[in-house]
Amino acid sequence: MPITKAALTRLALALSCAVPVVAITAGCSSTPSHESAGEYTSDSALTAKVKAALLEDPGLKSLAVSVTTYRSEVLLSGFVNSPEQIQKAVSVARGVGGVQSVKNELQVKPQ
């Protein structure tokens, strides 16, 4: 069966439509080192909730604690005044809905 010009045109048109669809959907999926747009949005909201919860606690609101979230795992970093504040910050972060785990990199300020 010979390939006609019309068949080649249809094939080219089909490929030209398929390539952008694949490129767009590939850009939305997550990989082990990159989040999808939905995951990023969810993590941003979770970071905001954890920061708000830390600010609501009278013993923690004045501290410079950094909160970062990646795939629902919260990372706390920075300096606090006591080991008790570390335990409290970790406890508050774990209590926020949606937090899967908390990685603690908080350190007590040298006196």
Image (tube, rainbow, N blue to C red):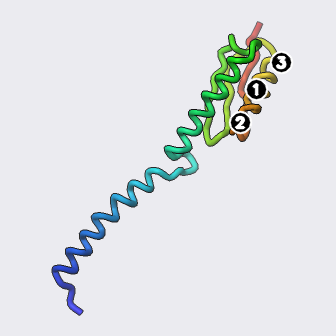
Alpha-carbon span between mark 2 and mark 3:
22 Å
> Element type at marker 2?
loop
Q: Nearer the viewer, residue 107 or 102?
A: 102
Q: Residue 56: horizontal and vertical position, in percent? A: 70, 18
Judge whether 7 appears above or below 74 on screen. Answer: below
Question: What residue is disc 3 on?
Answer: 84
Instruction: Count neighbours of disc 3 (C-alpha within 10 A) and say few if under 14, some if 14 to 19, many if 20 or more.
Output: few
| Quarter residue 86 falls in | top right
Q: Residue 15's spot in the image, x, y percent?
A: 30, 68
Which numbered disc flags the more N-terminal residue, 2 or 3? 3
Q: Residues within 10 Å of mark 2 (few under 14, many from 20)?
A: few
Residue 106, x across and y down, in percent: 72, 23
The residue that appears at 79% across and 28% down in the rendered structure is: 91
Pointer 1 or 3: first along the chain: 3
Which residue lies under the disc numbered 1? Answer: 92
Residue at image mark 2: 97
Rounded to the nearest whole Å, what is the CA distance between mark 1 and mark 3?
12 Å
User: What is the distance, in whole Å, between disc 2 and disc 1 at their CAs?
Assistant: 10 Å
Residue 26 position (above or below residue 92)? below
Corner quadrant of residue 19:
bottom left
